Image: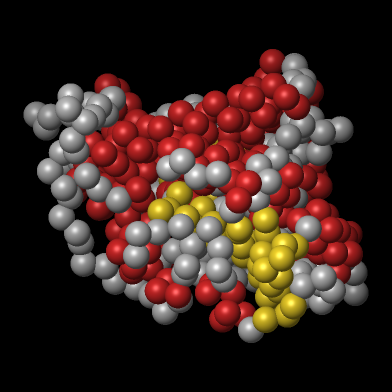
């Protein structure tokens, strides 16, 4: 029999790391799923994962594609294509967001679903990993069209989702209103017999419709709690730090406001699809959030200079927060970074080659599945409150979130020292360790 993995990872008694993990050849992948698998395989190599588990975890358990018609306001009918990938459920129900974007494709959703498995395991949640996507541009649809497409997609997913089976949440292009439409559709069509006890079929709902306080800010807040752990570990005074944010949507704008208002750091640059802006004297993060709400992006913000988008990554700052899309930091721009820390608010913003460059340049990284775990952690709190018929206070939610992030952060650092590996490798290993232990204990049915 293969040797089972240990469930806890300890430093050597004298504090020295195990033999240093040899570096790997890294390529720029053209496919996000290939990158997710390569990251997993690296963790599997370092932990000498048994071949059977390697095979199981390399592929999602279920891949669902639905095509369905939607009536537009013009009376015309379009066909929409949706995905739901259920990667793994050894630790609990499938869990993960739904992305509405014209660029959504199967391999992207597969990568994001796999990362959800690792994210939930790392945060010690009783959830597996899933992700969904709908190939539409929400910005091109009227509110009524958006409601129709959301309800029709929910209906097409049918009993492939459920409060004790697979629980969607917001992601790029979706929000609390999307989740409320999904919940309402599910309750009225699929789960009409258990209507009043199935609102936890989705998380990230509005508070009025059963959401949790603190869910809207949770991903950005989790990113900053990680940054705070890093600052404590490295004796950095955040109040003297400058930071830059890519993406000023839900994650980026909450991260910026919390890092400024609660830790005293100064926002000096921001970038999104509408432009790049900079002000070395500081940009007021709440004022910029108001501008983004009114104008749809950071472009045109009057109290900062517009700059060439390529200049953004060269910003003179301590902390860089990519909180937009995948594959933003590549081997081309990674050498230009001047910061001390990259905290990945987005999923998969750094290619493996860029990761290696940052590491060689002595830049610390808080990898995505740790840095943006706050969202799914508070989704878990929402799910728990719905199941128990409770509503928690905001200070309770924040306190519990902080504790879970701090625990996960510490576990990653212990793993890094133990294996003598990079932080990204340690993050994958710490997550994989949880999943592998459950497989070892339960075995393979029958
Ligand atoms: N879409 C978010 C993520 O990527 C949240 C998932 C959830 O709350 O289930 O982590």
Residue toward you, 295 or 276:
276
Q: Do we see residue 330 in this rendering?
A: no
The scheme the figure's colours follow is: secondary structure
Residue at 60% in and 30% down? 401
Residue at 37% in and 43% down? 427
- Quarter holding the N terminus is top left
The picture places residue 93, in percent across and down from the top left corner, at: 52, 32
Spot the residue most to the left: 1
The picture places residue 295, in percent across and down from the top left corner, at: 86, 69
The number of callouts visible is 0
Residue toward you, 410 or 33:
410
The picture places residue 443, in percent across and down from the top left corner, at: 25, 26
Residue toward you, 298 or 382:
298
Residue at 56% in and 63% down? 317
Tell me where residue 305 sits by quadrant. bottom right
When the figure is inspected, residue 178 is found, relative to residue 190, above or below; the finding is below
Q: Do we see residue 310 in this rendering?
A: yes
Tell me where residue 202 sits by quadrant. top right
Residue toward you, 400 or 146:
400
When the figure is inspected, residue 201 is found, relative to residue 219, above or below; the finding is above
- Quarter holding the C terminus is top left
The picture places residue 309, in percent across and down from the top left corner, at: 62, 80
Residue at 86% in and 33% down? 208
112 sits left or right of 413 in the view: right
């Amino acid at each position: 029999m293969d040797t089972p993995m240990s469930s806890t990872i300890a430093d050597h008694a004298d504090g020295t790391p195990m033999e240093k993990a040899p570096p790997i050849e890294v390529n720029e992948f053209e496919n996000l799923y290939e990158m997710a698998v390569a990251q997993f395989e690296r963790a599997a190599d370092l932990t000498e994962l048994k071949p059977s588990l390697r095979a199981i975890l390399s592929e999602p358990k279920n891949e669902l594609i639905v095509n369905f018609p939607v009536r537009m306001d013009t009376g015309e009918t379009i066909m929409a294509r949706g995905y739901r990938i259920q990667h793994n459920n050894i630790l609990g129900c499938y869990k993960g967001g739904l992305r509405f974007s014209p660029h959504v494709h199967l391999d992207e959703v597969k990568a994001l679903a796999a990362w959800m498995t690792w994210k939930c395991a790392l945060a010690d949640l009783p959830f597996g990993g899933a992700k969904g996507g709908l190939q539409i541009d929400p910005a091109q649809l009227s509110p009524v069209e958006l409601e129709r497409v959301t309800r029709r997609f929910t209906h097409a997913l049918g009993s492939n989702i459920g409060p004790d089976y697979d629980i969607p949440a917001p992601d790029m292009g979706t929000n609390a209103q999307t989740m409320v439409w999904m919940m309402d559709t599910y309750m009225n069509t699929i789960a009409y017999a258990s209507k009043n006890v199935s609102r936890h079929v989705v998380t990230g709902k509005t508070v009025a419709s059963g959401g949790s306080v603190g869910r809207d800010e949770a991903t950005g807040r989790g990113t900053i709690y990680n940054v705070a752990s890093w600052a404590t570990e490295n004796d950095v005074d955040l109040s003297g730090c400058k930071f830059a944010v890519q993406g000023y949507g839900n994650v980026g704008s909450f991260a910026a406001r919390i890092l400024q208002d609660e830790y005293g750091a100064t926002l000096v640059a921001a970038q999104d699809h509408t432009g790049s802006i900079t002000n070395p004297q500081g940009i007021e993060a709440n004022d910029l959030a108001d501008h983004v709400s009114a104008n749809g992006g950071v472009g045109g913000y009057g109290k900062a200079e517009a700059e060439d988008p390529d200049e953004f990554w060269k910003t003179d700052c301590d902390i860089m927060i990519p909180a937009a899309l995948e594959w933003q930091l590549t081997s081309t721009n990674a050498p230009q970074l001047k910061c001390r820390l990259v905290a990945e608010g987005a999923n998969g913003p750094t290619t493996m080659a860029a990761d290696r460059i940052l590491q060689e340049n002595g830049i610390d990284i808080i990898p995505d599945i740790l840095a943006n775990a706050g969202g799914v952690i508070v989704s878990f709190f929402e799910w728990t409150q719905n199941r128990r018929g409770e509503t928690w206070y905001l200070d309770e939610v924040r306190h519990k979130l902080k504790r879970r992030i701090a625990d996960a952060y510490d576990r990653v650092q212990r793993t890094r020292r133990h294996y003598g590996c990079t932080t990204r490798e340690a993050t994958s290993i710490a997550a994989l360790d949880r999943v592998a232990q459950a497989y070892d204990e339960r075995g393979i049915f029958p």
